Amino acid sequence: MITTLWKPLRHLLRALALIALILFTLYPLVWMLAGSLKDTQEFYTNIWGLPEAWKWSNYPQAWTRGGLGGKYINSIIVTSVSLLLIIPAVGCAAYAIARLEFRFKRAIYIYLLLGLCIPTGVLAIPIFMSALQFGLIDSLAGMILFGSAQALAFGTFLLRSFFIALPKSLEEAAVIDGCTRFQSFTKIIVPLARPGIMALVVLNGITVWNEYLLARILIREDANMTLPLGMKAFVDKYVTDYPQLFAGLVTVTLPMLLVYIIAQRSFIEGMTAGSVK
């Protein structure tokens, strides 16, 4: 009798836990969206509830006040070019470590893994000094190069697990059919590792898009600022305009949210596959 009652109760408890987890995850987004549609007075008097009168004018005002148009373009350029550098470099490095035999391979891989153990804040002064030395202060090129370099360690670690799991017989068959090592990599290995590559694109894309510390270190002029720096326009010395700040945050968050929704299937497949390989 107890066993019979426990089974549906267990399913009910599991469902309630999942519902609570979903609400806990989504509520900050709903709260931010609701806050972006209130005026300043209502934001403080009705901070947790839905807006009584939806103030859509916060969005064009936030766009103008933060100068988000140019910052959007800068963020798109930095994110797109960074991914164009990261994915080929990480793919070749991970393939070489996973498949080829060469001297000091293990030492090089351990050296790359050490990059995962260093907090980003610790690198602020070395990054600034290097950028100053090479003339990369206040330029999108500095954001792209340093951001790409920071992504190499994790990307190599992630893709290496996919390449190791693929059977070597596929490459051997490709070589027998006349493919070179590079052709077998591009035509056989890369398509099979697509879930891992998509997971890497999403993770690195979100990281670069939201990068604040690196932008704060390198960027000075307003014309070169990216979107995370643009959020400073809504925070004054004595007061913060939260409705417009939330409107700006929604505008900044929406592109990456859409990218994740579109690539969700490949991203989840890549992360779950990588966790067991």
Image (tube, rainbow, N blue to C red):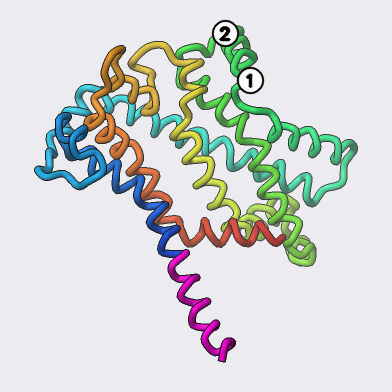
* Residue indicated by mark 2: 132
Which residue is more in the foreground, 154 or 38?
38
Residue 176 place in picture, x, y as percent: 79, 65
* Residue indicated by mark 1: 123
Which residue is more in the foreground, 276 or 150?
276
* Magenta-colored span: 1-17
Q: Earlier in the sequence, mark 2 or mark 1?
A: 1
In the rendered structure, the answer to whether residue 236 lies left or right of residue 4 reads left
| In magenta segment, residue 15 | yes
In the rendered structure, the answer to whether residue 98 lies left or right of residue 73 reads right
| In magenta segment, residue 221 | no
Write the residue at 63% across / 20% down: 123
Write the residue at 56% across / 62% down: 269
Task: Find numbered disc 2 in the image and state the secondary structure of the residue it sits on.
Answer: helix
Residue 178 place in picture, x, y as percent: 74, 61
Q: Please tell me whether mark 2 or mark 1 is closer to you in this view.
A: 1
Q: Dividing the image into 4 quarters, which one contains the N terminus?
A: bottom right
C-alpha separation, residue under disc 2 versus residue under disc 1: 14 Å
Q: Decide: few, some or many residues near mark 1? Use Cα within 10 Å; few <14, some 14-19, many ≥20.
A: few
Write the residue at 53% across / 52% down: 198
